[in-house]
Amino acid sequence: MGVVGDIERQLARLRARGVADGMPELRTSTLTHLVWAPPEWLPQARATLAGLLERHPARTIFLVPEPGRKARIEATASLQDFQLHGLAREVLSEVIEIRLRGPASRHPASIVLPLLLSDLPAFCRWRGEPAWASSAFGEIVGVCDRLVVDSSEWRRLPSAYGELAALFDRVAVSDIAFSRTLPWRRKLSELWPGIGSIERLRVEGPRADAELVAGWLRARLGRAVALSRREASTATAMWVDGKPVAAPGEAPSASELLSAELDRFGRDPVYEAAVRATRKQG
């Protein structure tokens, strides 16, 4: 409890300092937002959080695993304030960063559990592909209500979707890559009923986006759909049996996509079916 106690004391001092400065602020949280962010992912995770707090005031806990032979834990806490429309006072969100060095990164639950806000949901945004069999991943899945991933950050596709599907009965799962394809899926739905006989889908875009859209079509239509792809950083074009699909509008930002996932509760059967169908090649 030493590290947890230090964090709570840091937060208490920061709140007291704000009161002493005469700033009437409201501490409010709608959830606990865990972020597993290895050092290479930390800058992106921080940038996403900057655009998220006004939509979802939360206690955010960055868990940063670092290599090392000796176990060591370092923690810092800060308060971020912002103005919400209709409120005279500024709203406070708590941001905690915990660096877990060496063996300390294997068992994060002992630190996370006392910091979860009681009676509020806990979401975990896991950056990068999880080490599926690791104790750290298993513990985080065990303490959160929803796991949010972005499978476009993974290298082993589509095989990694099999690992993900094995979690569906343990925790609700969201995938930012699947959410990002929603405008394209709407455009494909507009092709009904003709698309009901689709045989081939071609995608210019990331591997995850292509695999998930193809899986979604297979699951919804109950038929084999062959997939071909040309690499691009974002989904820029799709073809159905050689015919181009009208492109949707501008894609939402990373913060907007994560914000939408934090509004979801419970399982997403459409996504789960799409993931399972990624293994059913046409």
Image (tube, rainbow, N blue to C red):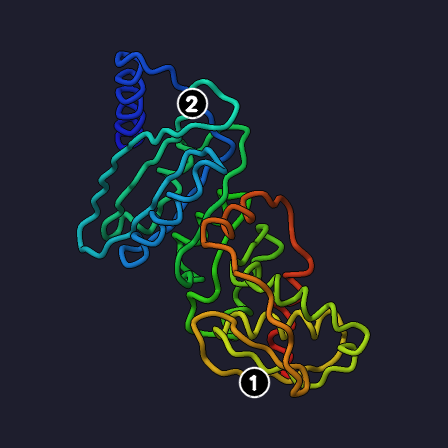
Sequence-wise first label, 2 or 1: 2
Q: Residue at x 46, y 18 (%)?
A: 88
Disc 1 secondary structure class: strand
Tell me the quarter of the picture where residue 214 sits. Answer: bottom right
On screen, 59 above or below 159? Answer: above
For label 2, count other residues whose C-alpha is less than 10 Å away and answer few (under 14), some (14-19) or many (20+).
some
Percent across and percent down for residue 62 are 34, 44
Left or right of 253: which side holds 266?
A: right
Count of numbered circles in the view? 2
Q: Residue at x 51, y 46 (%)?
A: 259
Q: Which mark is residue 101?
A: none
Left or right of 229: which side holds 72?
A: left
Q: Residue at x 46, y 25 (%)?
A: 28
Amino acid on which the number 1 mark rests in the picture: Ser
On screen, 185 above or below 269? Answer: below
The quarter of the picture where the C terminus appears is bottom right
On screen, 198 above or below 149? Answer: below
Q: Residue at x 43, y 54 (%)?
A: 126
Amino acid on which the number 2 mark rests in the picture: Arg
Q: Do we see residue 54 in this rendering?
A: yes
- Front-lying residue, 97 or 113: 97
Percent across and percent down for residue 148 are 50, 52
CB-based contact (under 8 Å), mark 2 and mark 1: no
Which residue in the protein does label 1 denote?
Answer: 228
Q: Residue furthest bottom?
A: 242
